[in-house]
Image (spheres, rainbow, N blue to C red):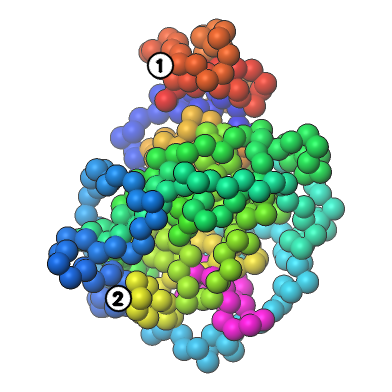
């Protein structure tokens, strides 16, 4: 579990390296051709600037300004797979629930099928340290795994996504729209507590994200940090790892919808949520941080795609239903087996976080995130630079004699920091900077 000092080290990192992703060298790019048509929705009649895709308790508009999509030449995308081809690929190989364990299956120099292509790596102490009876050596069984108890509805959940010019805009508060969560922190009476005592509380966030409405496919994939994209229920999707670079869906415990919160309260998934009932390969379940859609794995009843059927970024090109139309586009596929979702980016990501600055005990700053391996609070290591882990500064602890939830400030060698008093994994209460 991440200790607070990891975040304090992150305070002093320079943001000058923000989004400093490396783009792997490859063979010369192929002749240009626009990506598969229909990725961007057609503006609605009478509203030339924006076209609604979905509006659910829509919050205020996004005022963030990002640079336009990368202007490098589009790359030719292979013709989409037909339904017959998809059926020939699909199977029900994991019907018994047993899937290979993905611990430490990462690469840093070039993408590789079945591995997560990380921009940088740091291994920290994970939140869940006890293996449950669903772990079986080199495999684990998702049908045998216990889940966090409870069913909490979030009436204040908000999420909307719509097309505005060249952008696909997402706003919300990170809470699941239409689905319940378990009870967090995990109750001591929950049988899951003996395996994963997740102490974090789910809280509303500020989701304000702009992704390209017509993403550019790149023959040379981009590496990733700890986050993949945002799902259609407004919940962020993290990659397949916990802080120890282990298979998160296998080792960590989630609720009945396959989600859990990190240290700043950001609820998120690592794998396909059990609460999504339409998981067809043509159904959009979310969008990756490069703008390409994320779909389900089901081709037909009892027929599912798996990692072996996909490319090194965990995707294919086929027909997808978007904004009421069927279009042929590249898309990532959620699968039952590791790495569960996108393992690298086929387009240039405009951000490395779904929710910018998502919490002092959770996600790192965007600059460190773009260069390092970032995970959730009980899942993340220190920012880029390999800073040592330990206790927070004494000044941060002394600033919180009034208990948790109060506003606070403290001064150290790096200046004065304002924040909120919060409980941290060491069991102490410390001033956590905003």
Say whether residue 168 is left or right of residue 382.
left
Residue at the (71%, 77%) spot, across then down: 93
Numbered marks: total? 2
- Residue 407, by quadrant, is top left
Farthest residue toward the bottom?
Answer: 84
Residue at the (27%, 47%) spot, across then down: 61
In the picture, the disc for residue 138 is none
Front-most of residues 365 and 324: 324
User: Is 112 in the magenta?
Assistant: no
Q: Quadrant of the C terminus?
A: top left
Front-most of residues 23 and 191: 191
Q: Is residue 104 visible?
A: no
Numbered range of the magenta stretch: 295-317
User: Is 299 in the magenta?
Assistant: yes
Q: Which residue is mark 2?
A: 38
Say whether residue 218 is left or right of residue 198.
left
Q: Which residue is mark 1?
A: 417
Q: Position of residue 101 (x, y in %)?
A: 71, 59
Comparing labels 1 and 2, the label whose residue is closer to the camera? 2
The image shows residue 236, relative to residue 129, as above or below, that is: below
Residue at the (67%, 58%) spot, across then down: 102
Helix, strand or loop at mark 2:
loop
- Residue 202, by quadrant, is top right
């Amino acid at each position: 579990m991440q200790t607070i000092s990891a975040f304090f080290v992150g305070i002093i990192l320079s943001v000058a390296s923000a989004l400093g992703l490396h783009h792997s060298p490859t063979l010369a790019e192929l002749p240009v051709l626009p990506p598969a048509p229909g990725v961007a929705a057609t503006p609605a009649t009478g509203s030339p600037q924006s076209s609604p895709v979905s509006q659910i308790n829509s919050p205020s508009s996004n005022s963030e300004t990002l640079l336009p999509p990368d202007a490098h030449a589009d790359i030719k995308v292979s013709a989409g797979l037909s339904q017959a081809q998809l059926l020939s690929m699909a199977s029900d190989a994991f019907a018994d629930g047993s899937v290979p364990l993905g611990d430490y299956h990462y690469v840093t120099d070039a993408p590789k099928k079945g591995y997560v292509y990380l921009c940088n790596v740091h291994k920290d102490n994970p939140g869940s340290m006890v293996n449950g009876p669903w772990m079986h050596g080199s495999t684990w069984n998702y049908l045998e795994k216990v889940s966090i108890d409870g069913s909490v509805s979030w009436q204040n959940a908000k999420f909307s996504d719509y097309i505005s010019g060249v952008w696909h805009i997402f706003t919300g508060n990170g809470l699941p729209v239409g689905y319940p969560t378990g009870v967090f922190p995990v109750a001591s009476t929950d049988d899951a507590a003996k395996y994963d005592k997740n102490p974090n509380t789910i809280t509303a966030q500020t989701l304000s994200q702009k992704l390209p409405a017509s993403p550019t496919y790149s023959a040379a994939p981009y590496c990733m940090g700890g986050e993949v994209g945002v799902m259609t229920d407004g919940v962020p999707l993290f990659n397949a790892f916990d802080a120890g670079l282990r298979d998160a869906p296998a080792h960590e415990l989630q609720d009945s919808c396959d989600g859990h919160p990190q240290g700043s309260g950001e609820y998120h998934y690592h794998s396909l949520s059990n609460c999504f009932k339409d998981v067809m390969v043509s159904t959009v379940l979310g969008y990756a941080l490069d703008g390409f859609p994320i779909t389900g794995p089901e081709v037909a009843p009892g027929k599912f795609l798996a990692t072996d059927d996909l490319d090194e970024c965990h995707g294919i090109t086929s027909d997808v239903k978007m904004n009421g139309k069927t279009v042929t586009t590249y898309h990532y596929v959620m699968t039952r087996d590791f790495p569960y979702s996108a393992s690298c980016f086929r387009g240039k990501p405009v951000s490395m976080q779904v929710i910018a600055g998502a919490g002092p005990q959770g996600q790192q700053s965007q600059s460190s995130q773009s260069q390092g391996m970032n995970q959730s609070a009980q899942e993340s290591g220190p920012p880029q630079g390999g800073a040592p882990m330990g206790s927070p500064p004494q000044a941060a602890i002394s600033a919180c004699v009034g208990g948790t939830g109060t506003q606070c400030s403290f001064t150290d060698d790096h200046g004065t920091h304002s924040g909120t008093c919060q409980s941290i994994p060491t069991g102490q209460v410390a001033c956590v900077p905003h």
